[in-house]
Amino acid sequence: MDETNQAAVTWRKSTRSNGSGDCVEVADNLSGRVGVRDSKDASGPVLLFDGQAWQSFLRGFRQEHAVD
């Protein structure tokens, strides 16, 4: 994703972010894709996932981090 495209994207951090700077930001307002970037490097690389891949990631994450 080039800088022009990134400027038009709305990025958000997790509400669980603790302010330590070790965060990722997610943009889910893209047409059919989800962007993920390092919050410390806003002009750096962006990983792009299609909707199905992102949902699979979230399911796996939730299963791995489920509270017993």
Image (cartoon, rainbow, N blue to C red):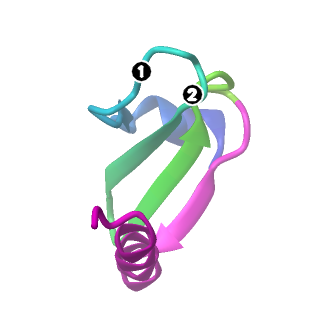
Which label's residue is closer to the chain start, 2 or 1? 1
The amino acid pointed to by label 1 is Asn
Q: How many labels does the image show?
A: 2
Above/below status of 27 relative to 49: above
Residue at x-position 72% and y-position 43%: 45
Above/below status of 10 relative to 61: above
Taking the image as shown, residue 6 lies to the left or right of residue 29, namely right
Callout 2–callout 1 Cβ contact below 8 Å: no
Mark 1, other Cα within 10 Å: few <14 / some 14–19 / many ≥20: few
Residue 58 location, quadrant:
bottom left
- Image x and y of residue 19, in percent: 46, 14
Decide which of 14, 47 is in the foreground and name it: 14
Q: Is residue 65 magenta?
A: yes
Task: Point out the stretch of residues depicted in magenta.
Answer: 44-68
Residue at x-position 67% and y-position 27%: 43
Decide which of 54, 61 is in the foreground and name it: 61
Foreground label between 2 and 1:
1
Q: Which labelled disc corresponds to residue 26?
A: none
Residue at x-position 33% and y-position 35%: 10
SS at badge 2: loop
Q: Which residue is tagged 1?
A: 18
Work out how far the residue at label 2 is from the one at label 1, CA to CA, in angstroms: 13 Å
- Image x and y of residue 4, in percent: 56, 34
Q: Which residue is tagged 2?
A: 39
The quadrant of the rendering that contains the C terminus is bottom left
